[in-house]
Amino acid sequence: MKAMKAGLGLTALAAVALFTGAQQATSEATICAPRDALVDQLRHQFDESQKAMGLLGQHAIMEVFASRQGSWTIVTTDTEGNSCILAAGESWDDSFGSILIGEGV
């Protein structure tokens, strides 16, 4: 039951972070959770999957999650497995990469 309540709370917080401030990509509130829970929530609630990742020094990674519908979320994860949403928005377009690949770059 506790896990269920935590999941519902995470859902509500993620929804607020993703949809407040239509013109702003960055959320004012910091939303953090264990990586597995946060990734599951992004997948189930927003149909987002990982599109890119990179190292942030030796102690964290940054990941970009996006959906086919255009929602996107940038997440950082530390070495302990704690993840935080840095930014979220709409109108993600990853066709730029396929254009470059198609041109032989």
Image (cartoon, helix red, strand yellow):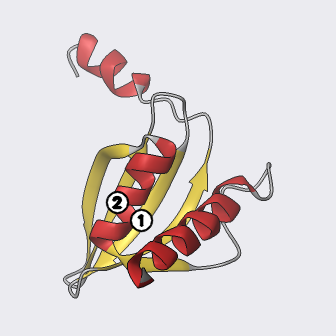
Quadrant of the snapshot with the N terminus: bottom left
In-image side of 70 versus 33 (left or right): right
- 83, 97: nearer the viewer: 83
- Residue at position x 57%, y 74% from top? 9
In the picture shown, does residue 78 fall above or below 88? below
In the picture shown, does residue 32 fall above or below 36? below
The residue most toward the front is 1
- 8, 82: nearer the viewer: 8
In the picture shown, does residue 39 fall above or below 47? below
Expressed as whole percent of the image width and height from the top left, the position of residue 96 reads 41, 25
Q: Quadrant of residue 18?
A: bottom right
Residue pointed to by mark 2: 39
- Residue at position x 43%, y 40% from top? 47
The residue most toward the top is 102
Quadrant of the snapshot with the C terminus: top left
Nearer mark to the viewer, of 2 and 1:
2
Residue pointed to by mark 1: 75
Local crowd size for mark 2, using a 10 Å CA cut-off: few (<14), some (14–19), many (≥20): some
